[in-house]
Image (cartoon, rainbow, N blue to C red):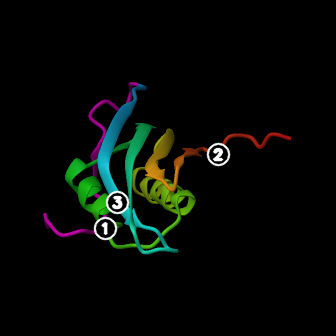
């Protein structure tokens, strides 16, 4: 396996497919770039999911998150894009991704995206 940033996510077969359980990852070293200023944004990405047939391989997740280091993106977009990519790779029963971004300009931002989408409130 490479040690360079990559958008390729690897999986392996769920060792306990008959059991409903949650897997949780906290990734406190996530960085991307503010698309307006070009300055780095720092965040903790929290991933929670209930696997179906597949589980996410951790080194590929690390390299995937690392691939955003020089990407200009808004917090809302990158959090949702990470969720979309992980759901495509793992096909979980349910999943959430939380981007907890460090204070910038006096504002602390937390973005949470969920799969499946919760019912819209009306």
Residue for point 43% across, 37% down: 48
Seen from the viewer's position, the closer of residues 95 and 77 is 77
Q: Residues within 10 Å of mark 3 (few under 14, many from 20)?
A: many
Q: Is the magenta stretch mostly helix, strand or loop?
A: loop
Q: Which mark is residue 117?
A: 2
Residue 30: percent from left, percent from top: 33, 54
Seen from the viewer's position, the closer of residues 84 and 55 is 84
- The residue identified by callout 3 is 31
Q: Residue 105 carries which label?
A: none
Residue 83: percent from left, percent from top: 49, 53
Q: Which of marks 1 and 3 is nearer the N terminus?
A: 3
Residue 95: percent from left, percent from top: 49, 41
Question: Mark 3 and mark 2: span between their CA atoms?
Answer: 26 Å
44 w.r.t. 34: above or below:
above
> Quadrant location of the N terminus?
bottom left
Left or right? Give the position of 65 relative to 100. left
Question: Mark 1 and mark 3: span between their CA atoms?
Answer: 9 Å
Quick check: is 14 in the magenta stretch? Answer: yes
Residue for point 40% across, 69% down: 39
- The residue identified by callout 1 is 67
Quick check: is 60 in the magenta stretch? Answer: no
């Amino acid at each position: 396996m490479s040690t360079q940033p990559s958008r390729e996510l690897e999986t392996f077969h769920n060792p306990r497919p008959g059991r409903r359980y949650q897997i949780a990852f906290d990734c406190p070293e996530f960085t991307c770039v503010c698309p307006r200023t070009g300055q780095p944004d720092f965040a903790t990405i929290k991933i929670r999911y209930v696997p179906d047939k597949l589980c996410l391989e951790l080194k590929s997740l690390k390299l995937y998150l690392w691939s955003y280091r020089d990407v200009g993106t808004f917090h809302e977009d990158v959090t949702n894009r990470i969720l979309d990519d992980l759901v495509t790779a793992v096909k979980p029963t349910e999943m959430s991704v939380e981007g907890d971004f460090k204070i910038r300009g006096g504002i602390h931002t937390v973005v949470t995206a969920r799969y499946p989408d919760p019912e819209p409130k009306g």
